[in-house]
Image (cartoon, rainbow, N blue to C red):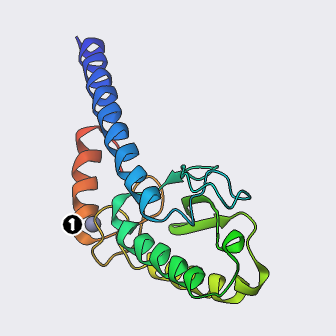
Amino acid sequence: MFVLLLEVRVKMEKSFNNELNECETRKQKEFYDKFPLLFPKHPHWSTKREVQEPECGFSCDYGWWPLLKKLCSDLTKLLEESGLPEENKIIPIDQIKEKFSGVRIYFGSFHESLNDKVYALVREAEEKSFKICETCGQPGEKRSGGWLKVRCDSCQEKLKEINKCIGQTH
Ligand SMILES: [Zn+2]
């Protein structure tokens, strides 16, 4: 009986995760379409402006998306106002992820004259992420719960409830 229940739960989780993944992929696509200079399919072909997901992926929860959108919009503005030739108006984002509880962003190569400004903007976003609940976007702080994540009070409580239901002690 227990094994059967467990199987049902695993199946339900799988189907929920698939739905979530599809939804996430669609939402991420909107992100890439909005900032084509940061998610280029052909970083070195100036005439192509097709977009794609970062080469090494985009994996963090929705709570940080407004922060990331602001960063992408600032980076795009920086490019547009840079006075650089069209073929250099590109800052390819290779990866967005959570690392050591904060957001981490990796880039491919871009014009060196942009270095200081790009990294100042990125540092600012990374620092802010440590105070924003990765799950919902409300003010948060680092919490344990299996692994260290930035969460608000309410998301932390929900996680505790879920962990209780599935018998974890965190
Ligand atoms: Zn939250």
Q: Is residue 147 above or below residue 114?
A: above
Residue ID at (55%, 60%): 96
- The quarter of the picture where the N terminus appears is top left
**Percent of width and height locating residue 144:** 42, 62
**Percent of width and height locating residue 65:** 38, 66
**Going by the image, does 51 lie left or right of 115?**
left
Number of numbered discs overlaid on the protein picture: 1
Q: Is residue 153 above or below residue 115?
A: above
**Mark 1: amino acid:** Ser
Q: Residues within 10 Å of mark 1 (few under 14, many from 20)?
A: few
Task: Tell me if residue 130 can be seen.
Answer: no
Residue ID at (25%, 18%): 8
Residue 13 figure quarter:
top left
Residue ID at (31%, 16%): 7
**Going by the image, does 56 lie left or right of 70?**
right
Which quadrant of the picture is home to ligand 1? Answer: bottom left
Task: Tell me if residue 154 can be seen.
Answer: yes
Residue 15 figure quarter:
top left
Residue ID at (23%, 61%): 157
Q: Secondary structure at mark 1?
A: helix
Q: Which residue is mark 1?
A: 154
Asked whether 162 or 136 is in front, the reply is: 136
Asked whether 87 or 55 is in front, the reply is: 87
Mark 1 C-beta closer than 8 Å to ligand 1: yes
Asked whether 131 or 29 is in front, the reply is: 29
Residue 117 figure quarter:
bottom right
* Identity of the residue furthest to the right in this view: 112
**Percent of width and height locating residue 141:** 38, 76
